[in-house]
Image (spheres, helix red, strand yellow):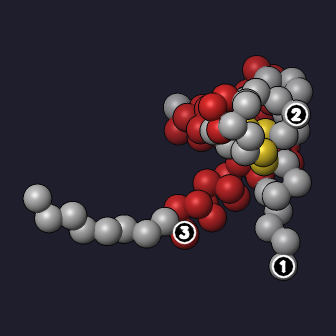
Amino acid sequence: MKKNFEDRIEINPKIMLGKPVIKGTRIPVYLILELYAGGYSSKKILKAYPTLTEEDLKAALAYASQTLKNEEIREYII
């Protein structure tokens, strides 16, 4: 099953040092998450970044969710 963010999220070492961005832009996924965390609504984000779509915002959230879901936690003993 194809994840709903794969067509919209791009990771390219030549764009934003390889940070995940919305494909065709230099808008990183982390920026979208920070805006949501800062209280921005989808409507306000889309107004601030008119090249984005509602689907791009959903893809950013889905990408972040999937990344965290697959993250491995390891205990390091110092």
Which of discs 2 and 3 lies nearer the camera? The answer is: 2
Residue 75 falls left or right of residue 4: left
Q: Image quadrant of residue 70?
A: bottom right
Q: Amino acid at mark 3?
A: Lys
Whether pointer 2 and pointer 3 mark residues with C-beta atoms closer than 8 Å, the reply is: no
Q: Residue at x 49, y 65 (%)?
A: 71
Residue 48 falls left or right of residue 52: left
SS assignment at label 3: helix
The residue most toward the top is: 48
Q: Residue at x 67, y 29 (%)?
A: 16
* Position in image of residue 12 (x %, y %): 74, 40
Position above or below: 37 against 27: below
Residue 69 falls left or right of residue 28: left
SS assignment at label 1: loop
Q: Circle 2 is placed at which residue position?
A: 24
Q: Quadrant of the C terminus?
A: bottom left
The numbered dot on residue 69 is: 3
Q: Residue at x 63, y 64 (%)?
A: 66
Q: Circle 1 is placed at which residue position?
A: 1
* Position in image of residue 21 (x %, y %): 73, 38
Query: How many dots with numbers?
Result: 3
Q: Image quadrant of residue 40?
A: top right
* Position in image of residue 45 (x %, y %): 73, 29
Q: Image quadrant of residue 43?
A: top right
Q: CA distance from mark 1 to mark 3?
A: 16 Å
Q: Quadrant of the N terminus?
A: bottom right
Is disc 3 surrounded by few (<14), some (14 to 19) or many (20+) residues within 10 Å?
few
